Amino acid sequence: MPMQAATPPADAMPLKRQLRLAERRKKLSSLALVLPVAVLLFVAFLWPIGALLKRGIDNREVMDGLPATTAALKGWKAEQGLPADAAFAALAADLDAGRGTPRLAAAAKRLNMEQSGLRSLVMKTASGLQAPADEAPAGDAATPSPRERIAALDERWTQPEVWQAIAANAAPYTPRYLLAAMDRETAADGSIQPVASDQAVFVDVFARTFWMSGIVTAICLLLGFPLAYVLATLPARISNVLMIFVLLPFWTSVLVRVAAWIVLLQGSGLVNQALMLAGITSEPLQLVFNRTGVYIAMIHILLPFMVLPLYSVMKGVPPVFMRAALSMGCKPFAAFWRVYVPQCMPGVAAGSLLVFILGMGYYITPALLGSPGEQMVSYFIAFFTNETLNWSMAAALSSVLLAATLVFYVLYARFNRPRQNRAAR
């Protein structure tokens, strides 16, 4: 009797669908394992950066404190003269509603950044509009208009520039802080122009930050390359001992290291005493509270960040390449420069990028070892955060610094990608 093919049950699932479901379950399991890390990354890293960037363009203080006034001033320009009576009435209503509230104080503080003296003007007007009941006018005919009441309290309300400061903040977002971080401002006609020369500060600060970070990076590379080469070519037993001395700064607080350099580099410190005993100098050198001391301390702290990437790349360079070049008649220096050094360029690029980015964010070392002329961008970020409480300006400076960091990282990625492609081939 011929055998008949087994008929699958009616509810049997096709094999292709079973494989698809198994693959989907596998992906979901992998995502479930990665999800806690992704949430932690978002909460601890991406969300604070996003909030910081938003704070640099946020401009809601005036809109929250004077909502009716900013709405009444939409479309108004200072060239038109004083605004209509509706704007004065809206201002009176906003001041009455916000008197004694934090939102009105925040709006007054924000306006004071736009034009000095506006904080006291707003708070004085809000208090003056609260007339005692026994001084209220007897009849409606004698009741002054909001324009008259406000102008009588302070004649500055008759100046279009005061109203222009309010109208300029009638939008929830503003480029004012980002422009100020680059020594720019918005002119009356809406164009962007440089600020006055006596107010231009931050372009020089950013240039100083990039210059000092570049100098520190170059010196760390000059010192770190031969040190990493020695560590990579020595026997493992000796190189491991020497590596301990390279990693030793990681085991000490930055503040302790900076304080130690102050003791060593001061006029009566060990460095100056050694120089005078050796006859190199006849009097103590000024090595602290200037750029020299900042450079010395930053190089000491950041040198391991240059050595470690170089060491990891050099350990992966086969020594047979150098021996092959020498056996073919190449001179030792030429073999080193044309065979060994190109293979170390990924380590050079990674170490330089790491040291440069870390150097741009230095705050404690320049603050303790440098003079006012050595302070970097991070000092002003801390100043606006802790002293003046102008968090928007601090966020704008941080945004510009972050943008510069991303630019350098993109340049590093474009520089390193062709080398990785050649190595893969």
Image (cartoon, rainbow, N blue to C red):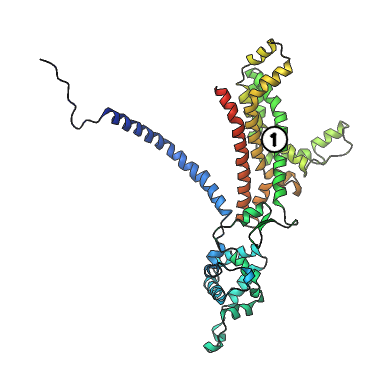
Q: Which residue is at a point 73% across and 15% down the rendered structure image?
A: 331
Q: Identify the amino acid type marked 1.
A: Thr
Residue 89 appears at what percent x and percent y? 54, 76
Q: Check the image and name the residue furthest to the left.
A: 1
The quadrant of the image that shows the C terminus is top right
> Toward the viewer: 163 or 29?
163
Tell me what residue is drawn at x 66 percent, y 15 percent.
322
Does 362 appear above or below 181? above
Q: Quadrant of residue 102?
A: bottom right
Depth check: 407 or 299 in front? 407
The N terminus, quarter of image: top left
- Few, some or many C-alpha atoms within 10 Å of disc 1 (few <14, some 14-19, many ≥20)? many
User: Judging from the image, what secondary structure is the residue with disc 1 in?
Assistant: helix
Residue at 46% across, 42% down: 39
Answer yes or no: is residue 253 visible: no
Q: Looking at the picture, how far across and down is residue 12, in whole percent?
A: 21, 30
Query: Which residue is at a point 71% across and 25% down the rendered structure image?
Result: 226
Is residue 133 in view?
A: yes
Decide which of 226, 196 is in the foreground and name it. Answer: 196
In the picture of the structure, the residue carrying the numbered disc 1 is 217
Measuring from the top left, give residue 246's x and y in whole percent: 66, 29
Q: Within the image, what quadrant is residue 312 found in?
A: top right
